[in-house]
Amino acid sequence: MITRFISDLHLEEARPDITDAFLAFLKEKAMGIDALYILGDFFEAWIGDDEKTPLQNQVAQALHEVSDSGTALYLMHGNRDFLIGEDYSRRCGATLLPDPTVVDLYGTPTLLMHGDSLCTADEEYQKFRASMRNNQWQQMFLQRPLADRQMVARQLREISMAKNQGKAETIMDVTPEEVVREMEEHGVQRMIHGHTHRPASHQLEANGAPATRIVLGDWAENVWWLDVSPDHEPALKKQPL
Ligand code: MN
């Protein structure tokens, strides 16, 4: 019995090595397991399920084979791919999960998040996030022609890169108090998230008891995943890309 977690692959045409590593990961480590959770920033960018690029199609097909093997598949939005919709999820054989979601992992309630909402010190980003997650804005955006959306996505990416260059390291990480607040709000002693690209397992206190926050790794240089099983402590693993 095993459940695996990954996030922050940032799949894109410019990084065929990551796509290859992902397809190999699915074959070797995702077939016939209990579940595979992909906790956001699966794709570097997403402007609507109607884009249907060869990369998106290839990934959907490979995921569907995993789903057909009996593995339950779950997708959560990241800050890059928050426009992934029900249509693409269906093509993957996956269920789209809201952020945050609490799941029972072999008896341990666990809070799953992408992680960007925990970075409250970056007020500018949180404002941007709030407007991007607005349902009305999203519906309007998705109705624009594909070419328009591709242009807007390129512009947003350039703005984001320029802004992040000037930001202090700590601002880009989670706010410890926000982690505790979320864990207490959901009454859990374990949290799993991605986003920060700082893979680690942190011990803390929440609800007046020991708690654990596990951060998944990004795939820029290594294949990172988390194994959760009934008999062992959750284990972060990595392999060179
Ligand atoms: Mn992210």
Image: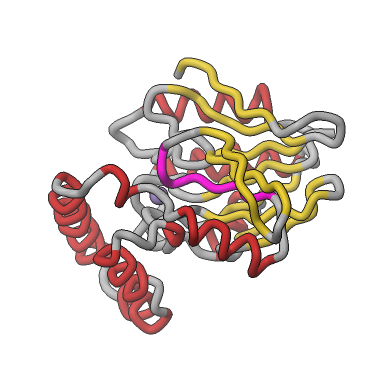
Above or below — where is 57 with respect to 126?
A: above
Q: Nearer the viewer, residue 114 or 144?
A: 114
Q: Which residue is painted at 55% across and 48% down in the image?
A: 193
Quarter of image, res 124: bottom left
Q: Residue furthest top?
A: 240
Q: Residue 234, percent across and down?
A: 71, 33
Q: Which residue is painted at 68% across and 36% down in the image?
A: 4
Q: Residue 81, percent across and down?
A: 41, 55
Q: Residue 74, percent across and down?
A: 65, 51
Q: Nearer the viewer, residue 30 or 237?
A: 237
Q: Nearer the viewer, residue 80 or 176?
A: 176
**Range of the magenta residues?**
190-197
Q: Is residue 54 left or right of residue 194?
A: left
Quarter of image, res 154: bottom left
The quarter of the rendered structure image containing the C terminus is top left
The quarter of the rendered structure image containing the N terminus is top right
What is the basis of the colouring in this image?
secondary structure
